[in-house]
Image (cartoon, helix red, strand yellow):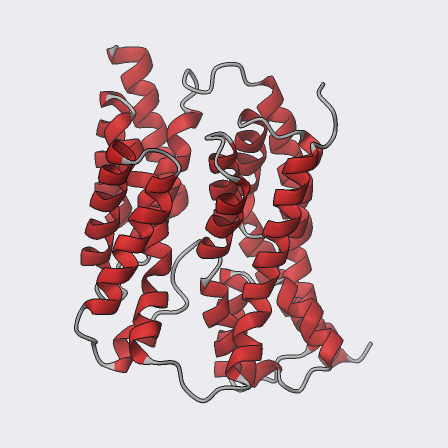
Amino acid sequence: MTPATKEEFRDAFRRGSAVAIAAAPFAVLFGAVAVDNGLSVAEATLMSATLYAGASQLVGVELFNHHVAPWLVVLSIFAVNFRHVLYSAAIAPHIRHLTFWEKATSLFLLTDPQFAETERRADRGIRVSYPWLMVLGLSVYVPWLFLTILGAFLGNLIGDPKAIGIDVLLPVYFMGLVLGFRSRAHWLPVVLASGAGSILALHFVGSPWHVSLGALAGIIVAALLPLDDAEAVAGDVAEGEA
Amino acid sequence: MESLFHTQTLLIIAAGAIATYLTRVGGYVFITRMKRIPPRAEAALNAVPAAVLTTLVAPAAITGGWDVSLTMAIAFLVGLRLSLLPMLGVCWIVVMVIRHLIV
């Protein structure tokens, strides 16, 4: 290993570990909530291994419990993860030099922090290499997987989730994510439209339709409102999930 | 313990994983083939996370009982100041105090 490669590995591992520590409670939370919502430990682990996207995993298991139509669960996961489309579009210039399989594998690990770190490295004028991307991604991925398993086993021991306050963690977590996007264009009208839309839809149509109908209300509002300058729309792609 | 896997759950996870992977490669594939996204479509896409996530917050805050409603109101205020993890900690303490010391 050349000193330069070694330095790349060290940098990627250090950054990845910091992300893994910050994400650790959510991995445990996901494991516990998944089991609480009727998934087996193996299913929760498989979900962490193949989706590897915290918010959408939590949305997914939340809907499992509501006996929602399967296609709607998948659509909701897709909707929550849609921001990745913007991420992979934004980092395209930095990873263009990679081979097909290098792109195919490193993009599997594309998360909010992976995106932010990649952008930051490219901003500093450093070429984003395949080993750096993989070490960064895997040093988050592997702990994520093991902490999911830990959480799932802890979840099995938990009797009444209300008594230990686990039931509010999910809505609070989503509230935090919503607030994380608050610097985006037309955030308040979108949130008000989605919030009102989902409450009305829950009342008049019922679960699970309140999710898609409420989201649709917010998205339509965003599309219809006068456009800001391009900067406001594209400016904060790095925000969102912790 | 129950069986390791249920067929329907497995199918949902597989489809969800494929959908997620498509979002991760989709932007790259799209942008390397296209010049420009229509501004209205971009504005709509930009609103997707807040719009979807809000629908998971609002009904819970309204229908979960007064203890949940109060906790969510505090979560909103706390969330304006703190990042996700401290926010979770504060709100967890709040709801535990309400349920075990006040009620």
Whether residue A64 sits left or right of residue B46 in the image: it is right
Above or below, A93 against A133 in this view is below
Residue at 41 percent of width and 19 percent of height: A162
Whether residue A171 sits left or right of residue B32 in the image: it is left
Q: Quadrant of the N terminus of chain A?
A: bottom right
Residue extending farthest to the bottom is: B35
Whether residue A113 sits left or right of residue A143 in the image: it is left
Above or below, A181 against A176 in this view is below
Image coords of residue A178 (percent x, y):
32, 51
Which of the pair B39/A165 is nearer the observer?
B39
Image coords of residue A19 (percent x, y):
54, 55
Which of the pair A68/B81 is nearer the observer?
A68
Residue at 70 percent of width and 35 percent of height: B7
Residue A183, quarter of picture:
bottom left
Residue A145, quarter of picture:
top right
Residue extending farthest to the right is: A1
Image coords of residue B45 (percent x, y):
37, 66
Residue at 56 percent of width and 77 percent of height: B28
Q: Is residue B87 visible?
A: no
Q: Is residue A122 visible?
A: yes
Residue extending farthest to the front is: A205
Above or below, A235 against A38 in this view is below
Which of the pair A42/A237 is nearer the observer?
A42
Image coords of residue A156 (percent x, y):
61, 21
